[in-house]
Image: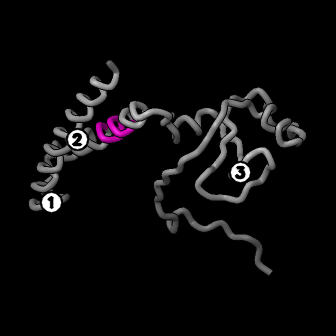
Amino acid sequence: MGGFVKPAKTYMKKYIGIKEINAIPMNRQEYNDFRGWTLPEDEDGSDEGYLVEYIDGGKANTPQYSGYVSWSPKDVFEKAYKIADTPLDRMYIEYNELIDKYNKLVLFLGRKDCGNVAGETQASLMEQQMLQMKSYLLTLRTRIELMKR
């Protein structure tokens, strides 16, 4: 009988996820207390983190919430999620994501081998894309500045 064999990393595919969640800061001990669990001896109860409620899927696992609830360490949570309570929050998220993509595209197009790697047609299309992204960034920045007033 074979046991579980961990798949080789070479077979794994890259995924990007987007979830809408509710969250509240809560350390590991507080989360364990909330769930009625005993903190394992090898865990630090003072670890900062968040109680996370997944509202777009997952069966409720506690009567206090209608979505699936779990705990996430602070650093993991803050890399994955940004506050999106207001239209201004959401515009900042969009602006920051777009500027990151724009900067990566600029770096790629600045490579000496860009045309060889992407092909001349793709490189030309990426140049157009870069100009459109820049225009979009300027529009978002103007909207953000007007909303802040």
Q: From which residue to which does the magenta span run?
A: 93-99
Left/right of residue 137 with respect to residue 45 in the rendered view: left
Q: Nearer the viewer, residue 57 or 77?
A: 57
Across and down, in percent, residue 12 comes to 52, 64
Which amino acid, by three-letter code, is at mark 3? Ser
The residue at the point 20 percent across, 33 percent down is 138
Q: Which mark is residue 122?
A: 1
The residue at the point 46 percent across, 54 percent down is 16
Q: Quadrant where the C terminus lies?
A: top left
Q: Nearer the viewer, residue 4 or 30?
A: 30
Kindly indicate whether the residue at mark 1 contacts the one at mark 2 (C-beta within 8 angstroms): no
Q: Residues within 10 Å of mark 2 (few under 14, many from 20)?
A: few
Which amino acid, by three-letter code, is at mark 1? Gln
Across and down, in percent, residue 114 comes to 16, 52
Q: Which residue is mark 2?
A: 107
Which badge, 1 or 3, is on the more N-terminal residue?
Answer: 3
Q: Which residue is mark 3?
A: 66
Q: Secondary structure at mark 2?
A: helix
Which label lies toward us, 2 or 3? 3
Q: Which mark is residue 67?
A: none
Q: Secondary structure at mark 1?
A: helix
The residue at the point 39 percent across, 31 percent down is 88
Check the image and report above or below for 135 versus 115: above
